Image (cartoon, rainbow, N blue to C red):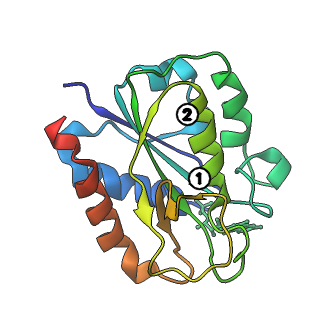
Amino acid sequence: MSKVGIFFGTDTGNTRRVAKDIANQLGDIAAKPINIRNASVADLLAYDTLILGTPTYGEGVLPGLSAGTATASWEEFLPSLSGQDFSGKKVAIYGLGNQKSYPNEFIDAVFYLYEAFSRCGATLIGDWAVEGYQFKASKAVIDARFVGLALDQENQKELTPTRVEAWLASLALGAS
Ligand SMILES: Cc1cc2nc3c(=O)[nH]c(=O)nc-3n(C[C@H](O)[C@H](O)[C@H](O)COP(=O)(O)O)c2cc1C
């Protein structure tokens, strides 16, 4: 069984910290988390299962230079996916956001990753219930569920460990 690849974007480090927690919880099956600004499409294609993390910046956009993050990030990476084939690959996405300050764009960036990897033929896994959050709108909600795990370190930090644990269990990666 190949390892689970973990790639994240971040500006202030929250999404990196969650990536490390995910790797620790997965143990031996997890590869070392890598910042997406240091990764190529080939690096992602080396894995059959991927966990991808992103914060949302600006007003509902991907982290990256036009959103004001300090370095390149998912915004700069996603165009390189054009024409790539991720069929047979499982992709699970987690997103960090702030539901109080950005109630109309909560974790919107998760949707952009979902859309980009769906278009490349990946099998998206890891949807998540919207109960337990207070927000008005999110592009990441499809058919009344988030298309990935929603985390909020500003307002619900205490819930993050149990959410991550339950989400990883729902992915059943050890069984694949
Ligand atoms: C300038 C700025 C814009 C933000 N815009 C959004 C947003 O549109 N939607 C959202 O859910 N969170 C938004 N956030 C919250 C961040 O996504 C959140 O703080 C996240 O934990 C940051 O992750 P990082 O430390 O990995 O960069 C914004 C934060 C900042 C500072």
| Residue position for label 1 | 110
Q: In this view, does 94 lie to the left or right of 74?
A: left
Q: Which of 110 and 67 is in front in this view?
A: 110
Q: In this view, does 156 lie to the left or right of 176?
A: right
Count of marks placed on residues: 2
Helix, strand, or loop for circle 1?
Answer: helix
Asked whether the beta carbons under mark 2 and mark 1 sit within 8 Å of each other, the answer is no
Please, what is the three-letter code of the amino acid marked with disc 2? Ser
Residue at 65% in and 65% down: 138
Q: In the image, residue 174 lies at what x, y percent?
A: 16, 42
Residue at 36% in and 39% down: 32
Q: Nearer the viewer, residue 15 or 102?
A: 102
Q: Is residue 74 left or right of residue 59?
A: left
The C terminus lies in which quarter of the figure?
A: top left
Mark number, residue 118 = 2
Residue extending farthest to the right is 66
Q: In the image, residue 148 lies at what x, y percent?
A: 47, 55
Please, what is the three-letter code of the amino acid marked with disc 1? Val
Q: In which quarter of the image is residue 33?
A: top left
The N terminus lies in which quarter of the figure?
A: top left
Compared with residue 82, is residue 124 higher up or lower down, i.e. above or below?
Answer: below
Residue at 28% in and 40% down: 30
Q: Is residue 108 visible?
A: yes
Q: Nearer the viewer, residue 56 or 17?
A: 56
Query: Callout 2 environment at 10 Å: few (<14), some (14 to 19), or many (20+)?
Result: some
Q: In the image, residue 170 lies at what x, y percent?
A: 26, 55
